[in-house]
Each structure stands twice: as structure tokens, then as C-alpha cells.
Amino acid sequence: MQTDKVQPIIEVSALSFSIKNNAILKNLNFSVAAGEVYALLGGNGAGKSTTLKTLLGFNKPTKGSVKVAGKEVTKALDFVRGKTAYLPESATLYPHLTARENVEYFLSLAGIKKSRDDINTAFNRVALQPDAWDRYMQTYSKGMRQKTAISLAILREAPIFLLDEPTSGLDPVAIDEFNQLVRELALTGATILMVTHDVYGACQVANRIGLLKNGELVGEFNAPENGRINTEQVHAAFGDYKSRGNE
């Protein structure tokens, strides 16, 4: 997808962020359109999670701007957070509640009413097995917790997804299932920004990959039409910058 032909939903323009004169992000520029999956790929300390926190309004840019759905994040926090579903590396859900009870509780906090059938439909959409819907969350695998969190975002009708290392710690089957779910969400028009250090997973699911090194975007890779980004090419570039000390 070529985002210069459509209005981007996420716009990061000349973004810099510093803490006590220590530059964490340096002049970042990228955008993500509706129906697109953009993967921000980098090693530990590259600035991936800092970028997500800035998009969520937890960090105020030192320079530049961050817009979500046309609104400057720092000036429209409630609007932006209402449009955004954030999925951390490990979804925080109540272990003593079932998946259904968790979803119902968080929907009630947001003032959203959904029927039992609506919740069932969301669970089916993320391929959460029916026999798990009324089991306690403490019995769930990480992959099942991630599916529950995604179903909650779907029920909130959030059009924008921010995913922080979403497949870390998942087994290969769960990773494939999660990547398939992300692709399906994009096909429905969702805007998806994920940060990851997983080269293979990023190439499998993303329309575009931005390579982040020491807070700077040092390269971008685009998927060909009806194809996927070349894993070997990205892996070579990622390995090259890691060998220069970005860990």
C-alpha cells in the first residue's frame, strides 16, 4: 500500500524525544494508512516502545509532531485513546475472571454495552475456542490472553491498533495464528502499528517495515503487490546494524 496516495491515520513527523539531553528518538518520519500493517523493527534500546508511548501521549515530543486520525496527540488525548487499542507484550487481564467476564468488565468501564452474541462473535473472530470462553484467565496461555485482548479491542470498535512485541514468548503455531489475525484486521480497514525485534514475523505480516537504530529510522522496506517483504534482505540489514553495537 502506498500511503502517499491516501490520507494516513498515523502521522509521525520529524519526531524527536529527549530525556535530560539524552536523545531517545531522532527526527522520526513515517505514516500508516487505514488497512496497513507497519512494523517498526529494532533491537533493545532502539526506541520502539518510546515511539508507542509517544503515540499514546505518555511522552511529549521534544520536537516534531505525532498525529492520530488527524488530531495532534498532545492536544486530543481522550480522542486519540478512544480510537486506539494498545496491546502490550503481555496483556493485563484479571486471572480470577473468565474471558467473558474480563471483556464485560472492561467494556463496562468504557461505557460500552454489547450483547452476549456480540461477545461470542468477537471470540469466534479471533479463533478463541468456545470451550475456553467461560474458563478462568489463570488457565490461559499467553496466546489465548492476546486473543482475548484483541476481541476486546474489536468490541470497542477501535480502528487503530498499537502492538508492542505482540508475539514475544508465543510458540510457532500461536505466532502464525496471531499474524493471520493481524492480516485479517488490516483487511477490514484497521490501522496497525507493531513494534518488534522479530524479523521473520515482521516480514510475514507487514506491508511496510521501518528499521529503527538508536532512535533513528535508518531504512524502510515495502512489500510488493500481492507479496511479502523479503526476509533475507531485512535480516541482512538488521544484522548489519546490530553488529555495529545497537543492542
Image: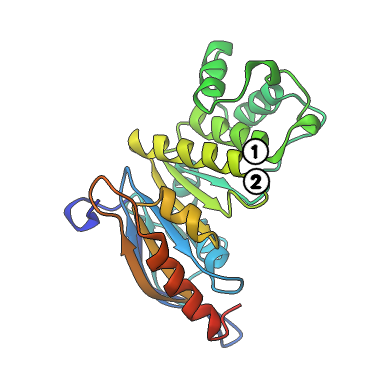
Residue 54 on image: x %, y %:
51, 63
Closer-to-camera residue (221/63): 221
Direction from residue 135 to residue 49 in the image, left or right: left
Reply above or below: 46 against 1. Answer: below
Mark identifier at residue 143? 1
The C terminus lies in quadrant: bottom right
Is residue 17 among the parts visible in the rendering? no
Which residue shows up at 37% across the image and 40% down it?
186
Element assignment for label 1: helix
Residue 170 on image: x %, y %:
65, 46
| Displayed quadrant of residue 11 | bottom left
Q: Where is mark 2, residue-wise? A: 170
Mark identifier at residue 6? none
Reply above or below: 226 against 45. Answer: above
Quick one: label 1 or label 2, which is nearer the N terminus?
1
As drawn, the residue found furthest toward the front would be 232
Closer-to-camera residue (75/70): 70
Q: Badge 1, how many Cα within 10 Å: few under 14, some, many 20+?
A: many
Q: Look at label 2 and name its amino acid.
A: Leu
Residue 228 on image: x %, y %:
34, 51
Which residue shows up at 69% across the image and 28% down it?
102
